[in-house]
Amino acid sequence: MDSLYMRSVMFLLTLSSFYSWGAGESDSYKIGAGDTISIVVYAEEDLSKEVLINSSGQLDYPYIGPIMAKGKTTSQLQMQITKSLRGDYLVDPKVMVNVVEYRKVYINGEVKQPGGYEFQPGLTVDKAIALAGGFTDRAAKDKINVSSNTAQLSSRSVSLSSNVQPGDIIVIEQSFF
C-alpha cells in the first residue's frame, strides 16, 4: 500500500508541476517574431515541439496549420491550440506553452560592445549596458533612449532603472565633453 500511495503522490506532484509550468512567467508578455516557444502536449510526443516565431508572427503547427502567435500571451496561445486540438484529434488535450528564448535587445551608441543580447526577464537599462561591457568614456549617461517595436516604432528617453522589453533598441548618446 505504501508503494501505491507514493506512486500516486508522485503522479499528482508531476501533474501539478505540469499545470503550473510557465506560471512564473508574466502573463502580460506578448509573443513576437524572433521568440522561440515550447509547445508541450501531454502524452503526445509528435505534437510537442520548440518553434521559432517567424517574421510574420506565425508558427506552423501539425494538424492545425498556421497560427498567429504575435501579440498573444502564452496563455492565449495555449487556449487556442487546446481548442483547435480538442474534438476530432484529441478528447481532452493538456497543452502548455512557454517562452524558451526571447527575442534580443539591441544596445547601440556609447557602450564598449554594441550589439544584440539575449533578453532576460527583469532586464533594466543599466543591466543591459552591463551586458554590453559598460559605458565608454564618451557616454552621456543621462541621454539614453529606448525604441520599442510596438504597433509603431516609438522612442523615449529613459533612466538607468527603466525596464527593457524584448526587441527594444537602447541608444546611448555621446557627451560633448
Image: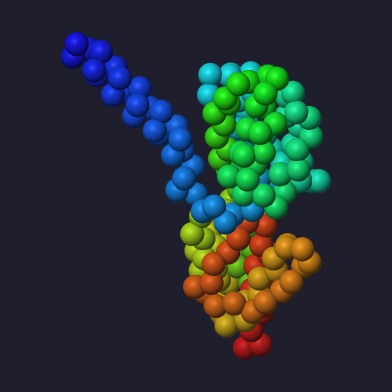
What is the residue that sits farthest to the left in this orientation?
2
Residue sitting farthest toward the bottom: 177
Left or right: 58 as drawn, with respect to 74: right
Number of numbered discs overlaid on the protein picture: 0
Q: Residue at x 59, y 77 (%)?
A: 158
Q: In which quarter of the image is residue 99?
A: top right
Q: Is residue 94 left or right of residue 146?
A: left
Q: Position of residue 40 (x, y in %)?
A: 57, 29
Percent across and percent down for residue 77 are: 65, 42
Q: Vertically, is 60 above or below 150?
A: above
Image quadrant where residue 128 sits: bottom right
| Quarter the N terminus occupies | top left
What residue is rendered at 73% in x and 62% in y?
149
Q: Which of 91 and 54 is in front in this view?
A: 91
76 vs 71, nearest the viewer: 76
Q: In the figure, is residue 68 to the left or right of 6?
A: right
Residue 111 rendering spot, x and y as whole percentages = 60, 68
- Asked if 117 appears above or below 6 in the picture, the reply is below
Relative horizontal placement of residue 36, taking residue 67 as reference (left or right): left
By what rule are the colours in the image chosen? rainbow
Q: In which quarter of the image is residue 153?
A: bottom right
Q: Nearer the viewer, residue 154 or 140?
A: 154
Q: Residue 88 placed where, x, y %?
A: 70, 20
Q: In this view, does 109 lie above or below 63?
A: below
Residue shown at 64% from the left, 79% from the top: 157
Q: Which of 130 and 164 is in front in this view?
A: 164
User: Which quadrant of the rendered structure holds the C terminus?
Assistant: bottom right
| Residue at the image position 57 percent from the left and 56 percent from the top | 28
Question: Does the rendering let one see residue 41?
Answer: no
The answer to whether residue 72 shows anywhere in this view is yes
